[in-house]
Image: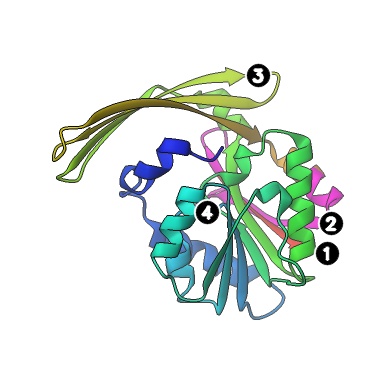
């Protein structure tokens, strides 16, 4: 998924997201579990740089990997200090002759890896790119909650004075593949130009059990050092939609 037209309005749609709070949470977790002082971080699915601009206050180097060219350009235009970005697929990460202290992947990016092959390739790539004792932190949709709560149809409206956006999300669960297809309809009204557009996108999100993550992590040379509800730090339950996993490279 490269977000296509969605990327153009991404930051506005998530203008209510607390990127600073999330960054502080992840930085605390990295420092808690890593075996050494962290200076460099690899960010998978770095988007438009919303986390990187805060990460740059903590670390000497943040290298992102992002599939969407539009997102990459937005991030570069921000001129974030200590930040580089590579246009590419997180299931095929390759920063030649470079190793990082730790890696992160936030906002359910790993859930966009719908196949076992993609997931294993991603974990193997991260294993190759970070140092022994380094930490890989990511959050994913959690299977018990998906089946217990079930995705609901959601409507979100954002207005910034110039643009009015309405996004409708309708979801379909594929029980066989552990994937939820989130079908977005986005309506955009530009009040200055009087332009009105509507487009549709489907984001296919895979959800995981702890045992699935444990199996793939161990296969790729990691061990789970913690799993908890993202931000709240509560133990995962059937009401926990997003779970953070912290893996350590053996």
Mark 2 and mark 1 in contact (Cβ < 8 Å)? yes
Quarter containing the N terminus: top right
> Which residue carries the number 4 mark?
233
Look at the numbered discs 1 and 4 and tell me whether their residues touch, using CB distance below 8 Å.
Answer: no
Circle 1 residue:
250
Q: Residue 35: where, in percent of width, then height?
A: 72, 75
Question: Disc 2 designates what residue?
Answer: 221
Mark with earlier residue (3, 2):
3
Query: In this rendering, is residue 101 above or below 212?
Result: below
Left or right side of 77 for 100: right
Query: Disc 4 or 3, which lies upstream in sequence?
Result: 3
Q: Is residue 130 above or below residue 90?
A: below
Q: Is tag 2's residue or tag 4's residue first in the polypeptide sequence?
A: 2
> Tag 2: Cα neighbours inside 10 Å, few (<14), some, or many (≥20)?
some
Instruction: Look at 41% across and 56% down and name the residue there.
Output: 74
Asked if residue 178 can be seen in this view, the reply is yes
Which residues make up the magenta segment? Answer: 216-242
Quarter where residue 159 is shown: top left
The residue that mark 3 highlights is 175
């Amino acid at each position: 998924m490269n977000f296509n037209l969605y990327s153009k309005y991404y930051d506005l749609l998530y203008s209510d997201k607390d990127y600073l709070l999330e960054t502080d949470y992840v930085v605390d977790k990295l420092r808690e579990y890593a075996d050494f002082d962290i200076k460099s971080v690899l960010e998978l699915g770095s988007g438009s740089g919303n986390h990187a601009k805060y990460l740059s206050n903590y670390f000497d180097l943040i290298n992102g990997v992002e599939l969407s060219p539009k997102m990459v350009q937005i991030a570069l235009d921000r001129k974030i200090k200590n930040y580089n970005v590579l246009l590419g697929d997180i299931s095929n990460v390759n920063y030649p002759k470079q190793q990082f202290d730790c890696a992160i992947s936030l906002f359910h990016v790993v859930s966009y890896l719908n196949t076992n092959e993609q997931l294993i390739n991603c974990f193997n790539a991260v294993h190759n790119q970070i140092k022994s004792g380094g930490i890989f932190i990511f959050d994913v949709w959690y299977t018990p909650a998906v089946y217990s709560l079930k995705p609901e149809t959601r409507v979100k409206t954002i207005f910034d004075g110039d643009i009015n956006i309405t996004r409708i999300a309708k979801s379909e669960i594929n029980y066989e593949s552990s994937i939820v297809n989130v079908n977005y309809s986005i309506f955009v009204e530009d009040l200055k130009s009087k332009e009105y557009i509507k487009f549709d996108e489907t984001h296919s999100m895979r959800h995981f059990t702890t045992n699935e993550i444990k199996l793939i992590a161990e296969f790729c040379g990691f061990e789970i050092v913690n799993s908890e509800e993202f931000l709240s730090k509560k133990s995962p339950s059937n009401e926990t939609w997003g779970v953070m996993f912290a893996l350590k490279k053996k």
